[in-house]
Image: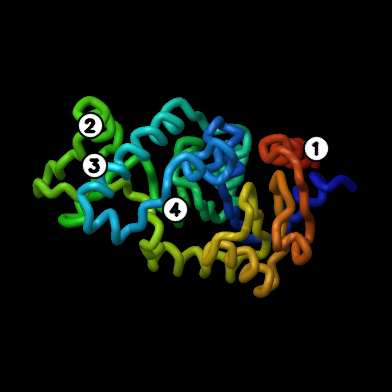
Amino acid sequence: MTSYETIAGWLAELQPAVAFTGAGISTESGIPDFRSPGGIWTRFRMIMYDEFMNSAEARHEYWQQKAAGQLEFGNAQPNAGHQALARWEEQGKLLGVITQNIDELHQRAGSRQVLELHGTALAIKCQDCHERFDADPLVDEFRRTERVPVCPACGGDRLKHATVSFGQALPPDVMQTAFQWARDAKLLFAIGSSLVVEPAASIPRVAKQYGARLVIINRDPTPLDSMADLVLNESIGAVLAKVEQARAAG
């Protein structure tokens, strides 16, 4: 039996199943991993949340970074991996997706149950009045004027992408739900994540501790490979497509 047939069998038998995804699933849509050579974090310095909140200069530098990064999201489309997970949810085989990604490609592929651990780059949130806005018009305004936009609701200048910045806490309600999904899962897929960024990297570990089968699909080895039931260092889209073929073959 192939690994793809094994996964197809587990997906049929072990419910609920949960997917935990990282940057690797989106690199196949052309969005660079921030940590990889040439990624955002190798070209710009990290701006901590407290610095953003307290310094107009830091906010301007932050917006310069985000204006550059936003271009990398604009033309990206969901790939075969995103689409397979959305189909599994629609078929009742996947409870949902827990993602470290901020690109909303899971939702665009059709996934309905998506927990965004690090927020979304497609929205802007005012840090003062907490109103949210579509990101593109405000990013375009910054590119035209080179000035940090002010909040359309309250006039404040602490507008930030609705993502979790360095030094900013992850949303507690989302994290609580994610760990509950991990405890309830009978099968957990860790897909495209290096599994080194905590506390999110503990989600597959918790699932395994509570008795789930753990499948890791990632380009490179991870620290959790030794506890996984199956590890595939292959293209995510290709693996999930082959699992779907195995499911169709019965």
Residue 248, above or below 172: above
Q: Are marks 3 and 1 in contact (CB under 8 Å)?
A: no
Task: Give the residue pinned by disc 2.
Answer: 146
Residue closer to the observer: 101 or 196: 196
Q: Which amino acid type is shown beneath numbered disc 4?
A: Glu
Q: Secondary structure at mark 1?
A: helix
Residue 141, above or below 161: above
Residue 249, numbered label: 1
Real-space Cα separation, disc 1 to disc 4, in angstroms: 33 Å
Q: Quadrant of residue 143?
A: top left
Task: Give the residue pinned by disc 3.
Answer: 133
Q: Position of residue 122 (x, y in %)?
A: 35, 40
Q: Are marks 1 and 2 in contact (CB under 8 Å)?
A: no
Task: Give the residue pinned by disc 4.
Answer: 116
Q: Earlier in the sequence, mark 3 or mark 2?
A: 3
Q: Name the residue located 79 percent from the left edge and 40 percent from the top edge.
A: 246
Q: Is residue 84 left or right of residue 216?
A: left
Real-space Cα separation, disc 1 to disc 2, in angstroms: 56 Å
